Each structure stands twice: as C-alpha cells, then as structure tokens.
Image (spheres, grey):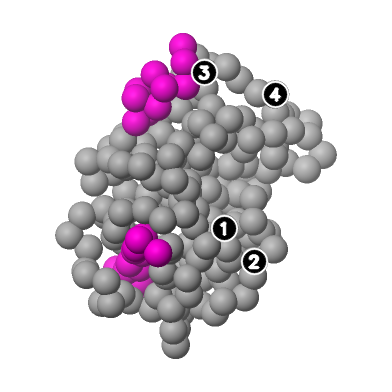
C-alpha cells in the first residue's frame, strides 16, 4: 500500500484557548508582549486554535514548535508535548511515524503495519491519525509516545507527547481531548489572538 493511500485512510478552569495563524509571509504566534514570526515557507492563511489542559504548563517555543508544554507526573518524571506544522506531507506519514518509532528504538514498519497500529478519527472535519508507541519490554530506558498527525489543505500538523509509560497512560485521554480541541474554522481573525504566556527562548526539545 502506498503512502498516498495511507494518508487518505488516516486522513475549563484556567484553560487557555490558543489561536495560531499561518499568514502569507510565514508563521505568526501570539506571544506575551509581542508576536514571533517563525521561518516556515509561505502558505495560504489558515487559522487554528486549541484548548490547553489545565494541568499542562506552557514551555518556550522554538523555530520548530508552535506549541510546547510540560506535563509533570504525580511524584517524579514529566512528559513533553510539542506541536509543529509543515507544508505538504513533511516527507510522508510513514516516514514520520517510523521516525517516532526510531526515537523509542523500535524497528520501522511498512505502510500496512502502520495502518493497523493507527486509530483514525476526525478533528473539526479534518482526518487525523492517532498512534501509541512504547519501547520494547526490557528496554533500559522505558518511554512512550502518543502522537497525532492531521492533514488539512497543503499543511500537515504533528502533535506529540513523549514521556514515561505510566504517566502517558494516565494522560492518554487528556491528550486525545487536547487533539480533539483543535479547531480549523471560524477562528478569530488575525490580530485577535490570545497570548500563549511564553517567551521566545529556544527549546532544547526539538524532536
């Protein structure tokens, strides 16, 4: 099965509604005290918004991230959540999912195997794929990735949570609700964005 076919098939309390806009000259993200322009290729205007879970803490953005959050565990450990977007298919869905698997030291899968591991949903009428990958049993550094890939128009969106397996197990529904909160239509016009409450510092978690 080709990658194109795979793409077709896959295709509150203190909560903060974040509005993200892709204007013709690049990517603008509303910042506390100003607007940061990220160096992505030009595209048609495409507003999007999401609702941050109350328990997630905003982190500094970077050239690769339009959203970044830290999720602390109940005792120790934390998870990292990133949101990124790129023009086109960003190298293909299969290659990106296998890249995530490689970060967990898992072998790559072919298109059909990846299709069988993915859950297909719609988010605001946009097709999305959800995946849940975990390191192999006995791995000395256990970790887990919850990921979502959404494709609308000429742009692909990647939402990824990485962290300890037990913490991600407890956050799985929260992550799903967060992905489902993405709204690609009827977002407030440019200039009426809600601040993220973060600075422009470069993240060290660009993965």
Q: Residues within 10 Å of mark 2 (few under 14, many from 20)?
A: some
Mark 2 lies on residue: 203
CB-based contact (under 8 Å), mark 3 and mark 4: no
Asked if residue 39 lies left or right of residue 121, the reply is right
- Mark 1 vs 4, N-terminal side: 1
Q: Residues within 10 Å of mark 4 (few under 14, many from 20)?
A: few
- Relative vertical location of residue 49 with respect to residue 32 in this rendering, above or below: above
Closer mark to the observer between disc 2 and disc 4: 2
Residue 13 magenta-drawn?
A: yes
Residue 37 x %, y % = 47, 70
- Mark 2 vs 1, N-terminal side: 1
Mark 3 lies on residue: 111
Closer mark to the observer between disc 1 and disc 4: 1
Residue 63 x %, y % = 58, 63
The quarter of the displayed image where residue 12 is located: bottom left
Tell me, for residue 64, which label it has, or none: 1
Q: Which residues are magenta?
A: 1-25
Mark 4 lies on residue: 107
Closer mark to the observer between disc 1 and disc 3: 1
Q: Residue at x 22, y 63 (%)?
A: 187
Closer mark to the observer between disc 2 and disc 1: 1
Asked if residue 188 lies left or right of residue 89, the reply is left
CB-based contact (under 8 Å), mark 1 and mark 3: no
């Amino acid at each position: 099965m080709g990658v194109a076919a795979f793409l077709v098939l896959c295709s509150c309390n203190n909560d903060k509604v974040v509005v993200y806009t892709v204007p013709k000259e690049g990517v603008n993200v509303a910042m506390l005290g100003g607007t940061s322009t990220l160096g992505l290729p030009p595209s048609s205007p495409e507003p999007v918004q999401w609702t941050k879970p109350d328990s997630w803490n905003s982190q500094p953005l970077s050239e690769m991230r339009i959203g970044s959050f830290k999720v602390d565990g109940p005792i120790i450990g934390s998870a990292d959540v990133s949101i990124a977007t790129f023009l086109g298919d960003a190298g293909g869905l299969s290659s990106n999912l296998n890249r995530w698997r490689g970060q967990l030291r898992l072998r790559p899968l072919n298109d059909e195997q990846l299709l069988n591991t993915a859950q297909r949903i719609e988010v605001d009428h946009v097709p999305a794929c959800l995946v849940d990958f975990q390191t192999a049993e006995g791995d000395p550094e256990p970790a887990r990735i919850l990921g979502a890939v959404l494709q609308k128009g000429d742009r692909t969106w990647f939402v990824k949570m990485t962290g300890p397996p037990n913490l991600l197990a407890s956050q799985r529904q929260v992550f799903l609700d967060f992905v489902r909160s993405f709204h690609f239509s009827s977002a407030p016009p440019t200039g009426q964005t809600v601040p993220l409450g973060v600075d422009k510092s470069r993240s060290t978690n660009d993965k």
